[in-house]
Image: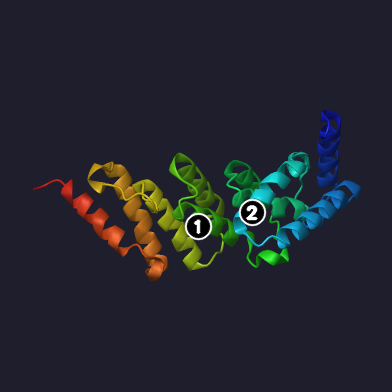
Amino acid sequence: MTTPARRHQMRVLAEQAAKAAPPGDEVVGSAYELMLAQLYDHRRTLKAIQSVERKIEAKRAFLPLYEDWLTGALAGGQGGQDVVLTSLMVWHFDCGSWARGMELAAYALAHGLTLPDQYNRDLTTLLIDEASTAALAGKLVGDEAMRVLAEVDQLTDGRDAPDQARAKLHKAIGYALMGKSPTHEPDLATLDLSRAHLAMQQLQRAHELFAQVGVKKDMERLERRLKADAPTT
């Protein structure tokens, strides 16, 4: 087991390496090379696993080995390209570790970091996809879903992304406001009116961006809910 002294040393080395890398340049140094070698070795292990569930179990076991590096990198980071940081951000999303993943994502977006080539997407699109897909699949739920989706919306606001991806994010936010999930169909008659209005706005925006996003029936249900409480004249 790694000793407290060794963990402290890794945090210091990571912070120093991050501070030494100017924005846009790749992080370098022996400690970074060690982390890269470990990451590549773990990737080979994951590639040999066919089950997605077992891949996630393996990632969950690997993640603690990088935490001291990540803490130091965030503390000292000046925007240098860090493949370890961006790769592990995705692993945290895969494992449902949203708080840590979003901390890494906020840093990566703020400094314009790029993702490794294997992800075939830019950072903004990946972040939108990962959060909205998890929420719509019922893997990100309740208050945590609202917090994460709201942060993703705020972090990516004004950044370029495919309309389909952005539509899915608005759909996920709308469903979170409604309390809708793959295993739960909410009774909209009991839905708070302000949440119903907000959910309708989100679903309308989703439909505007991509008509095939699949929210028309829910918009109709929300419209009936809103009309039921509309003031009569």
Residue placed at 28% from the left, 43% from the top? 191
Q: From the top left corner, tell me how far across and down residue 116 is, in percent.
A: 72, 62
Report the number of numbered marks: 2
Residue placed at 77% from the left, 39% from the top? 68
How would you rate the neighbour count of disc 2 (Cα within 10 Å): few for under 14, some for 14-19, many for 20 or more?
few
- The residue identified by callout 1 is 133
Secondary element under disc 2, as helix, strand or loop, is: helix
- The residue identified by callout 2 is 54
Q: From the top left corner, tell me how far across and down residue 224 is, in percent.
A: 20, 54
Residue 15 vs 165, above or below: the answer is: above
Residue placed at 84% from the left, 54% from the top? 37
Q: From the top left corner, tell me how far across and down residue 71 is, in percent.
A: 74, 39
Residue 90: quarter of image: bottom right
Residue placed most toward the observer, 92 or 224:
92
- The residue sitting at the right extreme is 30
Colour convention of the picture: rainbow
Residue placed most toward the observer, 67 or 51:
51
Indicate which label's residue lies in the foreground, 2 or 1. 2
Q: Horizontal placement of 182 versus 41: left or right?
A: left
Report the amino acid beneath label 2.
Arg
Secondary element under disc 1, as helix, strand or loop, is: helix
Report the amino acid beneath label 1.
Thr
Q: CA distance from mark 2 to mark 1?
A: 20 Å
How would you rate the neighbour count of disc 1 (Cα within 10 Å): few for under 14, some for 14-19, many for 20 or more?
some
